[in-house]
Image (cartoon, grey):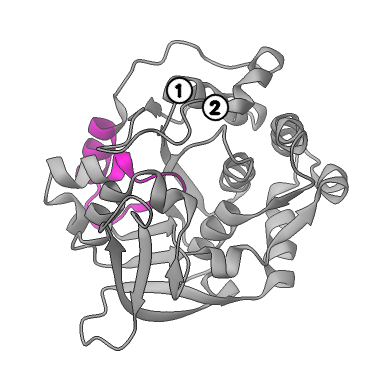
Amino acid sequence: MSTEETIPVLLDTDIGSDIDDAVCLAYLLRQPRCELVGITTVSGQPMERAMLADAMCRAAGVTNIPIHSGAEEPLLVPAKQPVAPQAVVLDTLAHRTDFEPNTAVEFMRQTIRSRPGEITLLGIGPLTNIALLFATDSEIPAMLKQLVLMCGTYPSGQEWNAICDPHATAIVYNAPVKRHISIGLNVTLRCQMKADECRKKFTGSVLEAAAKMAEVWFKERDSICFHDPLAATVIFEPDTCKYESGKVFIDLSDEKTAGEIRWDTQTDDKPHTAAVDVDVERFFDHYFSIAAGN
């Protein structure tokens, strides 16, 4: 891949819960090789999440990226994150308020169909929108260039995005995507930064907007884990991580384990790729070299 190649990215996010979504979006907005073709929001209060995404875009001086509100509830299970806590900062940030409900899936469908084989779909929230997209248009998975998810943990275990909507997770992992890459907790948990260091490093207009949202996060936690930014980074710097191929199975056997990852590298059928190691110093150097500009 040429280092100059521009990559069209469609972002599906639950921005407003964990702060790492905003930190991820800051990177995408500053990455010169990223053509951010749209942002869709998922999970409780999706319209407020769309407003937060728009606030981040405006902080970066960008007003032409389509933003669409998506699914508020999981497919079959009760909602685990019915509200977007970071929406409390919206009064301090310029943003649109005229979002319509439930336009995300159709926007995703039209965008991918208009550019077959070109779009990288980056999912960094519960997989409800993506599952609805795949279920309502069965040709879409094969029309993606690749699907990159912050989802799961490898070789096995529970992770928030996967368990928030376990049935959606199963639909997505069973879909015939040509290239399916998962960045899980086994690598992202190594990419943590304490609150005081984040405050020092979050410079430049777009990261300063993320910093306002981060203060909501820091009321209950003393650090940020860069789960979603790592997933975004590997689209442009894949060698930041090392990977294995295998097949992901999603446990739906009972309520306690619903959405749990089962990872098999011994099977002949290996449709999935998962990160198994990360160069943490390389990741942070790259992230802030891109995101911390004005």
* Quadrant (top left, top right, bottom left, bottom right) of the C terminus: top right
Q: Position of residue 108 (x, y in %)?
A: 28, 38
Residue 133 position (above or below residue 70): below
What is the crowding at mark 1: few (fewer than 14 residues within 10 Å), some, or many (at least 20)?
many
- Residue 45: which numbered mark, if any? 1
How many angstroms separate mark 2 from mark 1 (CA)?
6 Å
Q: Position of residue 57 (x, y in %)?
A: 58, 30
Which one is in front, 158 or 99? 158
Which one is in front, 80 or 91? 80
Q: Quadrant of residue 43?
A: top left
Q: Is residue 139 left or right of residue 264?
A: left
Which residues, given as a range, are shown in magenta? 105-130
CB contact under 8 Å: marks 2 and 1:
yes
Q: Secondary structure at mark 2?
A: loop
Please tell me whether residue 109 belongs to the stretch shown in magenta: yes
Q: Which residue occupies 68% across, 63% down?
A: 191
Q: Position of residue 99 (x, y in %)?
A: 41, 16
Q: Nearer the N terminus, badge 2 or badge 1?
A: 1
Q: Label 1 sits on what residue type?
A: Gln
Q: Which residue occupies 72% across, 62% down?
A: 284
Residue carrying label 2: 84
Q: Label 2 sits on what residue type?
A: Ala
